[in-house]
Image (cartoon, rainbow, N blue to C red):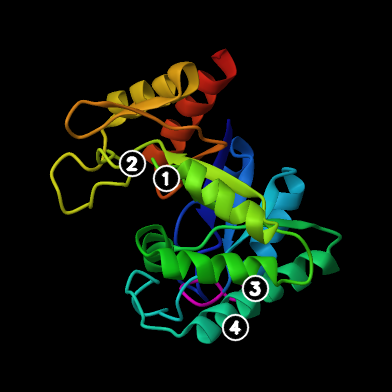
Amino acid sequence: MKLNCDLGESYGSWTMGMDSEVMPFIDMANIACGFHAGDADVMHKTLMLAKRHQVQIGAHPSYPDRQGFGRRSMNCSAAELINLLHYQIAALDGMAQIHGMQLCYVKPHGALYNDMMRDPAILATVFTAIASYHKPLALMLLATAKQQQHQQQAQAEGIDLLFEAFADRRYTNEGLLMPRSKAGAVLNEAEVLQQVKLLVSDAVVITESGQRLPLQADTLCVHGDNEAAIAQVQSIQQVLQAS
């Protein structure tokens, strides 16, 4: 199971995250494309970090909501959503090609990610955007109880999917992430490692009600926001290597 992390979310002189510290421990870098965070210089720097550590790169597009860090939903038409996705993906793709790098996948950010997992119409539009891009790209989305249905929809569009699980989040019985506003939504360090071990050994997570929920994940989302998060990523990596 590969580790993915959201990176390149600084802007100008404002720094977000510890990209240099976490990059050596991950396999996939989801790089912000400028609509919620990131700029041309930050994108370049993040690409160079990924190249140095031989990390696979993906576009991390969002709604055009820099002030809200992409965490606010927007009522976009299907055409608008397709165009804003193409715009962001193409920006990162073009910069990557300049440096001989290959963009491999797309992982929507924040509210857009949550909206596409909740609303089938938005997910269908995202599928259309990825399918109509000028070259094949995989789409990363949350592994849920609807995983088989999502796989069938993607196959109809000719898209490869990457299913992800979250190391540090509690799941609902439906396989969605518990809202951060609820107590217990974010796992502590011991719970994180236990959840990772269960995903690796049994392909399940324990939901908010204590049920065992099967999840087939290709990749695990981790964070590199602070020193504690970096140490946690190292611990997760050790669990994966031991398996």
- Disc 2 and disc 3: Cα gap in Å? 37 Å
Mark 3 vs mark 4, foreground winner is 4
Q: Which residue is disc 2 drawn over?
A: 175
- Between the C-alphas of marks 2 and 1, the distance is 8 Å
**Residue 109 percent across, percent down from the top left:** 46, 63
Q: Nearer the viewer, residue 231 or 4?
A: 4
Q: Amino acid at mark 1?
A: Lys
Q: CA distance from mark 3 to mark 4?
A: 23 Å
* Residue wearing tag 1: 146
Q: Quadrant of residue 46?
A: bottom right
Q: Label 1 near label 2: C-beta < 8 Å? A: yes
Was residue 38 drawn as part of the magenta stretch in this picture? yes
Q: Nearer the viewer, residue 236 or 86?
A: 86
Q: Quadrant of residue 90?
A: bottom right
Question: Which residue carries the number 4 mark?
Answer: 83
Q: Earlier in the sequence, mark 2 or mark 3?
A: 3
Question: Which-is-in-front pick, marks 2 and 1?
Answer: 1
> Which region shows up in magenta?
34-41
Q: Residue at label 3?
A: 41
Disc 4 marks a residue whose amino acid type is Asn
Residue 160 is inside the magenta segment: no
- Judged from the image, the secondary structure of the residue bearing numbered disc 3 is helix
Query: Reading the chain from its start, which is encountered first: label 4 or label 1?
Result: 4
